[in-house]
Image: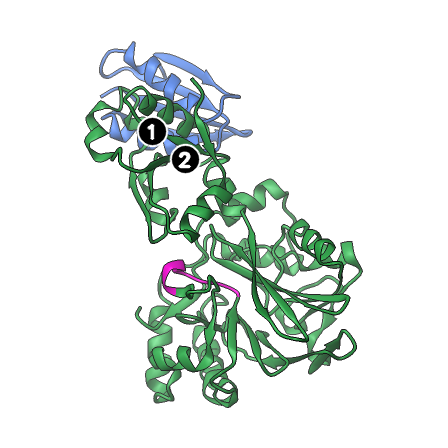
Chain colours: A blue, B green
Amino acid sequence: MQADKVLDATGLSCPMPVVRSKKAMDELDSGRVLEIHATDKGSVKDIPAWAKSAGHVLLKQAEEDGTFKFWVQKG
Amino acid sequence: MSLRVMTSADVVERILNKQPLFIVDVRNADEYADWKIEGETIESINLPYFELLDGVEPYLDRIPNDRELLVVCAKEGASIMIAEELAKHGYEPAYLQGGMKAWSTHLYETLVYQDDRIKVYQFVRVGKGCLSYMVISGQEAMVVDPLRFVDAYLKLAEKEGVRITHIVDSHLHADHVSGGLELAQRTGATYYLMKSEGAVYDFEPLENHERIRFADAEVQVLAVKTPGHTPGSVSFFVNDKLLFSGDTIFVSGLGRPDLGEKVEEWAEDLYRTISEKVADIADDVLVLPAHYADLEKEMNEDGVIGETLGKIRSENRIMQNIPKEEFLQHVIKSAESVKPPNYKEIVAINKGLLSKTDEEITELEIGPNRCAVHHTA
């Protein structure tokens, strides 16, 4: 999936993956897609919940070799 | 500025001493709805941390400043961030060390019974509602339903100057991983469990023991087969005074019979157990179960989670000789509720069929025990 920006939040523990995601998203225009990579297990639930509460759209979520990947479109 | 830290032990102290504590739980809404810190003097709200990233100001009117304040999250990180924000607004918040993960594994012990022959400690895993016991007599001790934090038992045994010689599991647990095998390996004690529960490692089958005696026969343990919650559930009747009831009888309900895909068969077992075996046990026997669901309701004035069998019978309609059909209907219906988190994997680990790291087990065990069918349900 094509992303406008990729955020590497691997190795960071809660709450940093969500904090960094929010910052990265603040710099994008509406409709753009942010791809997030994280290894913290909490992000599996927290990133989708954050995206929903902030009015963004979670387009896709996947796990590859212990890395959780999210594609979030800015609302 | 340094934040105050509260440990799980500090929180338990507030709950037991009935001191007011306001909790801001910053996990996501699902996790909070599923399982949270509760107590008579505990009030909490859920404000997910990711909704507070633009500042806590819009939510301050929901957070009182008239009592002790604690911020809680899954592991600790987010609670520190939010506590720091609250501290900028005139609050003096603490955060929970290790978060709900630490809360889930915290144990405390309390002396619940003593006579001239035995002394009994109750170990309370307050975050999950799991109970286990140490029965001490002379130089020996028996541990009932040990949790996997076996150091707690070793420490108490050392303090009491006794040797753990007997370990019993009332059944194969579905909500938490047993510490029975590890404690047996570390102490050389005999570990008893019903063979019919399906465990594949070495233990002493309870099928071969109607009675266990120890400490020069000062302690007589009658292994009463009480199938229902599981086919091999056993209750341990000690010196005709104490009934360690496992997950068969709780202070406020019975053990659910539906965690083995054979709910109707196991419910029939439970009916026979209650109407035949338990009916023969005297009213003044103290029931000490392996779980509680609601600490406020199930803990008595002495801080003990336990109740006389007579009182349990009088307050629990399904134990009052009701018609079999009504019993089965009630038990089967209320067993349709949400099951214990990850119970199939936990059962497999307890059987010795699946191996996981401590870290993975901690993740699997997160959440409430959900082992009971309640008379009010």
Tell me the magenta residue range: B290-297
Pick the quarter of the image with the C terminus of chain B: bottom left
* Label whose residue precedes the other's in the sequence (2 or 1): 1
Residue B108 magenta-highlighted: no
Q: Which residue is mark 2?
A: B73
Name the chief secondary structure element in magenta.
loop
| In this picture, residue A46 sits left or right of residue B118 | left
Q: Which mark is residue B49?
A: 1
Q: Is residue A30 above or below residue B72?
A: above
Q: Is residue A1 visible?
A: no
Q: Are marks 2 and 1 in contact (CB under 8 Å)?
A: yes
* B177 relative to B260, above or below: above
The chain to which mark 2 is attached is B
Q: Label 2 is placed on what type of residue?
A: Cys
In the image, B270: left or right of B213? left
Q: Please tell me which residue is depicted at 53% across the width and 65% down the height of the picture.
A: B290
Relative to B11, is B344 above or below? below
Left or right of residue A51: residue B299: right
Seen in the picture, residue B245 relative to B155 is either above or below; the reply is below
Q: Position of residue B246 (x, y in %)?
A: 54, 70
Residue kind at label 1, given as amino acid type: Tyr
Residue B245 can be seen in this image: yes
Few, some or many C-alpha atoms within 10 Å of disc 1 (few <14, some 14-19, many ≥20)? many
Name the residue furthest top. A27
